[in-house]
Image: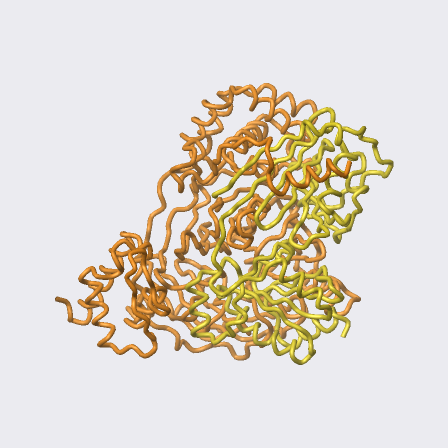
Chain colours: A yellow, B orange
Amino acid sequence: MTLRILFVCFAFLAGTFSASSAKAKIPIMKQKIVYGRKPSSPLEILKTDELLAAARCSTDVAHVLDHWGAIGKWKLSNVDMDGAHVYRGRTSWSGVWIEARRYANDEVTAFRITNNSLTTATWRNANCTPSLRVDTSTQKKNFAYGRFSDHDLDTLLKQGGKGMIYIWSPHMNLSMIGLKEAVAIAKELKIHIEVMVDGSADPRALKDALQSQHIDARYFQAVDSLDILMRHTTLHYPSLLLFKDGEVLDFMLPGYEAKAPLMEIVSSRLGM
Amino acid sequence: MNTLNTIITASLFFGLGLSSARAQHDISGSENPSRAPECKTIEPALSKIYGVGATSLNYFISANGYLVYVITNQGNKVLDTRTGKLFDVPGGVDPVPTPDGKYFTTPGLSFYSAEDLKKGIAEGKEHFSDLPTIQDRNGGFGVYQSIGVLPGTKTYRAATDRDGSTFAEYEPSEDGKSVKLVREPAQLCPNIGAGTDRTGSRFEMMQLPMISKDGMHLSVYDSTTQTTKIYSIKDPTNCELELDLGMPAGKVDFDFTGNKIAFHTDFYGFISHYISDVSSDLTRDIVVMNLNKDKTGKFTSIDSFARLTHSLNKGSGTYYPRWTEDGSLYATRFLNSEYSVGKFDIKNEKFAPYWSPKTQSQPAFDKEQAKRYALGALIAEKCLDTPESLSLFDRSLFALSLDPAACESLVTKYWADEKLDNKIKGDMDRLPIGDAGKKSIAELTIDDLKALCQSGSASTEKAEQVGDTLKHNKTMQETFTSSCAECHANGFTDESGKVAPKFSLSTMTEGELFRSLRLMQSGAMPPEGSEALSPEKKKLLQDLFKQKLNDTGDAQ
């Protein structure tokens, strides 16, 4: 990787961040996901004070999360096998996510993630001064057929209305078959459909799809949106997201679905 | 406060001052000589690589015996792993064999005779796209079929994605020449999400269904928990949840013993791969888990865990690992812009005993665990761009992927470093391992870590390349299209300003193709100095085209 890596130590900001870590009085959320032992429960959303309840340096961590634009809705992403609870949350900026990892010793590490930078914040010293480190990349990939960025997603959502986001891959044939059906459904339901392609797809396969599958050239814009990728949309193509009222719904459908059931799912989810 | 906040924010965005450059190492030192040699990793399980030349592979594959079923841009094909040759088979999506290898299927549950296919290959036939279907009725239900053979019977239980998951059962005739639908398609696990409409909980909890080889278990991705789960489907109308893997996985494949699963996932260093072009950095690795069962055959826990690949190179990946009866795994590979099918022998792999503070019945955190975590912490500090972004567990798995000599060098060089020692101790403090665990770590010596480097049966032998990477029964037009279209379809200008002509491949005549081939034969293409082709690739192309000319008796 061509990375410009900076290690930033904000010792001089101790005055800012060394406020005493008043322990919140909210009890620690009981862990419900237990690997390999018990059924896991549906994901729950935590507020920031719940996420940081009784955590080390909680006030200071909260301060940084707030700075980073955290909207305060944290979803438990997974529990690592080292005992760490990993939470993810969106920020008030499109294309910027935060991941907070809370270790078993109640230490927290936070990551501010964009599509070209990763900022890591740790609180490992006694006075809760954060160490911040920024990793950035200047490397850019040329998407031969354009890309769909977080800015594009933002613009799409601001237009309002209801719609589908369909992501296909030339490496998954059913996703190409499903594309035509998804477009037809959008037309029938009179909703918007935004189509994009697997950003890791081989350019040769894309060219082949363009020439032999007769897929509309508009549908070759590559996914380059962190917001979309953070929703596990790369697990299995095609992937479908839905949006309404300016928000992407908390629902991701991986895999092909025939037209009739897909129509039902889309209309039901969008309340049509 | 606001001023200070502004400084912080500005620093975060622009990396202002107070910074010091950090060594840029990556774990994949084996593929980038500029990186620290002591960070070199190996993939000991990868034993063979089957090149498929310019054929564009879909990610999804299936395997049985010596046949690997793949999907290409030219329809379904089967790879004969004995020879590396590809053969056309019917359909354009998801050819999936039965576990006994007698048949293969396509979506909608059309059955074809794999015995006839094997016989034809043995007789030298090259195309099988006209093989007839042999079932009486296919049931016509859903896609993404997976198939098991019910224990002690010849009955095939097939599951598809319809209505979350739907199943049906089939039986072969006495002579094996036909297959009959014996149990009509019905909803699988109707108790999951019962009481909700089909687009409600049930549907969300039953995505990417895959059935085990004995038809007794089903794995599904549950979007309500964003994890992959395994259900018992002994009673397909009343399924019981047995295991939650705790992570999202691609389609799971159960092995033939019923004790192992394999899948691809991107959870290793997930976020570190977003820092340089979101999508192009995405990688996939394959993971194998040994599972524990109780006396009744119920999955009780995860026993051990291995990652067979470590695709930290941008935009690369290994997808959809599939088991064969002998315990081998096959998976699609897309590395360095080349497609291939990889064969993995897991006997060469080191497995990490599964340990989690949340599972009380698991072994205590002992010295072996301590070694792995400590070495993982050392690797993170010296070899990874963004060490914090990998969980402590993920780091510990890298300890099992290091080249033994590189690993020993890493330990020798850095273990005594006091600063690192403090950092590693800090990492270990994050583990909920109690006093006994902390004592295990405190007592570690450099020799303990060196012993870990050399432990196991990890092989450093290079995987064997099988098959001609560029010649796979392609017509001259197909070969020319796939080899040259990249530059010529839209014109191409190399660094020296030479321009490759545009042409429409679909209108090229055989004569024009031959003239182009002669140019290639003379070494005139691709332009000297062009980065379009490496010298190795150029030679391969020239050899191929010479061979094509020889095939048609037109060689000079």
Q: Is residue A269 at least partly visible in the picture?
A: yes
Residue in view at x 45 percent, y 30 percent:
B407
For the C terminus of chain A, which image quadrant?
A: bottom right
Q: Position of residue B126 (x, y in %)?
A: 31, 70
Q: Residue furthest front?
A: B3
> Which corner quadrant of the image does residue A83 belong to?
top right
Is residue A13 left or right of B543 when viewed as pictured?
right
Q: Is residue B307 above or below residue B374?
A: below
Is residue A101 left or right of B547 when viewed as pictured?
right
> Which corner quadrant of the image does residue B234 belong to?
bottom right
Q: Is residue A240 above or below residue B180?
A: above
Is residue B155 left or right of A187 when viewed as pictured?
left
Residue in view at x 15 percent, y 71 percent:
B553
Q: Is residue B175 at least partly visible in the picture?
A: no
Q: Residue furthest left?
A: B556
Q: Is residue B375 above or below residue A161?
A: above
Viewer-closest of B30 and A145: A145
Is residue B386 left or right of A263 when viewed as pictured?
left
Q: Position of residue B520 (x, y in %)?
A: 22, 63
The count of marks equals 0
Viewer-closest of B556 and B41: B556
Q: Position of residue B171 (x, y in %)?
A: 54, 71
Q: Position of residue A63 (x, y in %)?
A: 76, 38
